[in-house]
Amino acid sequence: MNPVAVHRVSFDCVSRFNLIRRESGGGGFSGARIVNSRPRRLHAVTASLITSADSFEVGRLIGSYGFMNVTSYSGLRSGDEFESTSDDIGRLKSQDIGEGGVKIRLYEGRISQGPFRGTPITFKVYPGQRAGGIEADMMAANELNAHSFLQSNKNLPANLLILVGGFETQFGEQWLAFRDGGKDSAADYARIASEKTSRARSQGAWNPYEKEVTMKRRRNFVVTILQGAMKGLAFMHANDRLHQSLGPSSIVLNTPAEREAMYLIPRLRDLAFSVDIRPSCLEEGATSGALSEQLWRRATASGAFTVFEKRAFGIADDIYEAGLLFAYLAFVPFCEAGRLLENTFRLDIEAVREYCLADERLEEAVKFLDFGDRAGWELLQAMLNADHRKRPMAEAVLSHRFLNGIVK
């Protein structure tokens, strides 16, 4: 169910927050219940979280996914060579990727004790150091810390997945429990929508009226996903946190049905790579966390040296990832399977549009981005601007005419 997620390496500078190891006796699991694990106190910021394994029940395995680290970017050629790279156009941008060693498992579950008894949850399980190395513990600690920090804000929006607790088993696995926000990700939705398009076209002529109704619903649904994702990201940035893992697999949907767009609540998840960009964390020497090394190396290479320059670079980097998400959702749900875009590109958007116009299989994606006198292309170009200083803030993206002119 869960595709491999593409993530850029980063790490919160506050690495001292960790899931405290829990002493445990034998047994480990008893039926669907995790038992014989004596709870221990977490830091003050996690005081409201449920930290007793006895308070949870575990259901079926939902799926698993891995993390891949984007280590560098190598753009496509431009000018005269652009026209001769037809194989590259489907990807729009190439990337150098190194596979990480951390494999995440997801389980259904529920709270079995206390005032929230019966509340459905989703477990995100990080492997112990033996299977996942120190990186797994660092990612789990960072995700715990990021959620605890953000959830301390009284104005928490509905567009962030809520962490309700966590514990560590006798095997060293870190189990984080999240309120159930849905089983499908934006990537799952895009894949299903693409397959539906392929089936409809394979059956011959698509009834024009039925096609228009379907595409209108699809446009509304995609824009609602983008609006929700940007609301969550705007909140994070306003509270000095970067996401650094934004992509279709990091957005969970409470419904994948396009007919139910009015009830759709997209929620950001996967904060394992979140970065704290408070000034105290960006002072010299404070940005040397093992997982954030690539982020700050790219920042320095881009001319960001001061605290405020690094902060601005980090925010712009998240906006770039949001632009990649936008591009993915602008094409994949509207095109036939097999015409998928890679998640990372930086090209002359007008040139991409001209290419897409020549391919009828990309027709609906072009129509989508053409709304509002090509407002979609305009926003996409801004978010993927090669100069990070010229990318819009999340609030500006939210107020852009493209995200406010399609949903009726």
Image (cartoon, helix red, strand yellow):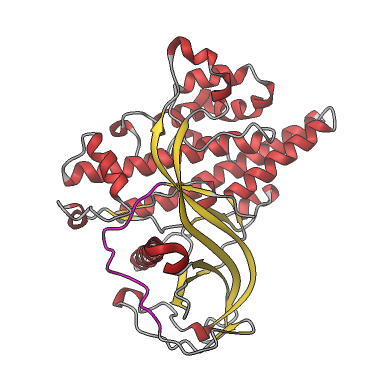
Residue 11 is inside the magenta segment: yes
Residue found at x 55% / y 56%: 65
Decide whether residue 394 is among the magenta residues: no
Res. 351 visible in picture: yes
Is residue 266 visible from the viewing direction of this image?
no
- The image shows residue 398 at horizontal and vertical percentages of 43, 42
Which of the two residues, 168 or 386, is positioned nearer the viewer here? 168
Q: Is residue 394 left or right of residue 340?
A: left
**The magenta stretch spans which residues?**
8-22
In this view, 152 is above or below 342: below
* Residue occupying the point 43% across, 53% down: 232
Q: Answer with left or right where residue 166 lies relative to residue 332.
A: left
Furthest toward the top, the residue is 80
Task: Give the quadrant of the N terminus.
Answer: bottom right
Dominant secondary structure (helix, strand or loop) of the stretch shown in magenta? loop
In the displayed structure, 197 sits above or below 296; it is above
Q: Residue at x 31, y 34 (%)?
A: 388
